[in-house]
Image (cartoon, rainbow, N blue to C red):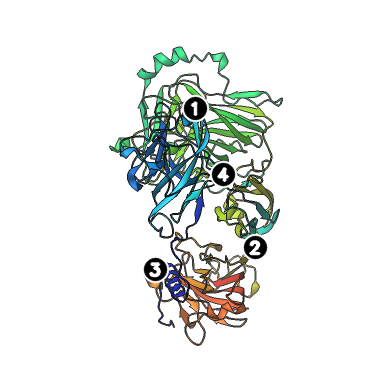
Amino acid sequence: MTVSAIRFSKQLGACVLAAIAAAATATATAGGGGNGIILSGPLNHAVVDNIGGTSLNMATSAFDDLGPVSGDWDFNFYESAGFAFYTIETYATQYVVDNTGNVMVLHVGDMVGPSSVFSNNAGTGPVPSAPQWAAGTDGYAGVKFNCDGRLPNPVPGGVCYGFVHITTTGSTGFPATIDDTGLDGDGNAITITGGGGGGVDPSATVTPTSLDFTVAADATAKQALNIANAAGSDPLTYSIETRGNRPMLIPHVGTAKNRGDNRNVDIGKLEQLDHLTHRLAPMLTSHPAPAQNAPAPWTPVGVDGTPTVFQADDGTYENTIGLNNAQGGGNESFGAVWVNRFAATGALTIDSISIEWPSATGIVAGMQPNLLVYYDASSSGDLSNAVRLGTDTIVTIAGSDAFETYPTSFSVPGAGDIYIGFVDAWALVDGGFEGIVSPAAIDLDSSPGAAFLSGQSAAGVLTDLDNLANNDLTGSASSFGFPGNWMVRATGTAGGGGGPCTGPIVNWLSANPTNGTVAGGSNTDVSIKADPTAGGLAAGDYTGEVCVTTNDPAHPLIAVPVSLTVTSAVPATCAGGADEIFCDGFDPAQAGTVVSGTINQPVADNADGSSFDFALDDYHAYDASITTDDINLYDLSPGGMFVYWYGDAVPPEAAGLTGGVVDSGGVDFAVLHSGDTVGPSSILSAGSIAMTNWQGGADGYVGVAFWNESTSAVNYGYIHMTTQSPAGFPAQVLNWAYDNSGAAITIP
């Protein structure tokens, strides 16, 4: 039975309540949209040294290194007889200029606002720059731009003032780096306060200092990691990776697709472009490769710290290969992983990677590939078993037909196969990169065949860089008909690097959310999840790290050790507790299974709050892009604790059947207790309203009816929660349970 009630989205509810609150407030406020000062934190993004340069979106801190001068961008910085400034007219952008019309070099303490003098050079070309920019300086460019509609709240006047922190070097200004940005999101003047991102001076604390999990092989467990920022500090930004300790690496066991012989895979977009005529003359003379200087690809790594060269090619390439749709008449390229297989006999650090980029194949200076290294302790020769080492290492292509060497620091933990190469990151976008680019030069007349690749054959499916088993084109280049070696080399130093957070990213450990911002004097919880099944972990002991990167100069990297004990899976039990192979004489019985778990985390005390997905056992910060959640609890100040049910996101067959159990009044959500039942006969509401019965403080259960995506049915469950007066906060979610058969469930 469902009570008919007004049902509206969380966002609409927030607007309505905010309007009511404003009407009830006697004091009026003038101006100010509520966005405040927005600081990017450290960006440290290199400006491409060519006529295309780098474009910047001030509202999102996004960059495009292919130099667009139209569209969703504000400013473009590039090389034109020195460091140059361009305004992209989409948002009426302008720079602060001096009395001669040149872009000024501003410093800490300077103000950018309505009284500043701005120019866009009448939109006819670059705004002239002060000589200091080309001579080398560390300064700030003042800017203004239209920002209303691009920020969460309306901006009075529609214009924002801000700055771009830029470091240049003599004698042309390059290399140049965009260090950080800042803006006032309410249309006010902003003072440059320095300190990285306009005065970023946070103080990060992460607790606990270690995590210890014990979980069955077929189960999961979660613990909270708290990230705090000291009172009075500037906003703290953080990002999180979960890594395995260097001595212990687990391949993606059990996740590889059963592809059989890769020769039988429909390679679809794999395109071979012959550049034999173009390549021979210049390369044989300018890049001779005598046999004695070309060590075999599986050269053992020494133990004395002597750098070792990993090289499989003979110095010339005969063809180039790309992943694209040229054969079907299309004009798009798709990002793929291009790596050479080498071997190590012990720990080492890959301290440089060298790549020869082929000419006349769509490669142009300024393109940015992402360097990659993978490791397979089993030396199986199956690339899909390898785990990724390190993080994104974006480099810039300077030219073609010559090896370019890039410094790197990839720590290899021990003996095994290592796969070294790159992904053509410019093409790793949904829909592909416009234009046919064949980035992988291949040497076809030397042996052995070290070249491997991994990508997707279906258009619109992005290549997975972290788990190559998820890509359906994965194997040696020989298996696709191209026996040879990529023009990719590397050097390694025996003994390896080490230290915290140098191990590979692992999928048995995860964080939610993976990034965020913490205001001064505040803190937030991140849910750390151990999932042995995701990593194919057998019973045993494992170690890893939660790696928290912050913009706190004193704590840029905080490593939290993780220990995991995986126990044997618990056998399914039949009715009455009997442990049988076949519960019902044929297949194990599934109906009537109660799924439960522990959360023991607070409800975030803000307007977003915390959300929970029963079927996925996923408790996390509210995310508007996630529509499969079942309940969202949040603080809609001054209204206190509110709830948002995802009734507007369930399929039609579940409409009106999901929501929360209400009390005898039929409107407010009930505080249930032990012995109460949640099921088809419960009175439900999906109203996004205040949790009136909970705001005064309670210890009880929220009854929930939700759409279970895994069973395609409405299921019934509960969440155990404690709240406090007068608004319901602080609030703590303790545990949960539901019956996955669709039957009613009784609170124990």
- Classify residue 95 by image quadrant: top left
Q: Residue at x 60, y 73 (%)?
A: 721
State which tag comes first along the sequence, 1 or 2: 1
Q: Which disc, if any, is residue 729?
A: none
Q: Which is more foreground, mark 3 or mark 2?
A: 3
Cα distance between the residues tagged 1 and 4: 21 Å
Q: Secondary structure at mark 3?
A: loop
Residue type, label 3: Pro
Q: Secondary structure at mark 4?
A: loop
Q: Quadrant of the N terminus?
A: bottom left
Cα distance between the residues tagged 3 and 4: 51 Å
422 or 105, nearer to the observer: 105
Residue 27 visible in this rendered orientation of the protein: yes
Could you say where residue 427 lies in the image, as x and y percent from the top left?
40, 39
Q: Secondary structure at mark 1?
A: helix
State which tag comes first along the sequence, 3 or 2: 2
Cα distance between the residues tagged 1 and 2: 69 Å
Q: Which is more foreground, mark 1 or mark 3?
A: 1
Q: Which residue is mark 3?
A: 651
Could you say where residue 48 lies in the image, as x and y percent from the top left?
44, 33
Local crowd size for mark 2, using a 10 Å CA cut-off: few (<14), some (14–19), many (≥20): few
Cα distance between the residues tagged 3 and 2: 34 Å
Q: Which disc, if any, is residue 135?
A: 1
Q: Which is more foreground, mark 1 or mark 2?
A: 1
Residue type, label 1: Ala
Q: Which residue is mark 2?
A: 570
Q: Are marks 3 and 2 in contact (CB under 8 Å)?
A: no
Could you say where residue 50 lies in the image, as x and y percent from the top left?
41, 29
Up the image or down, 507 lies above or below 130; here it is: below
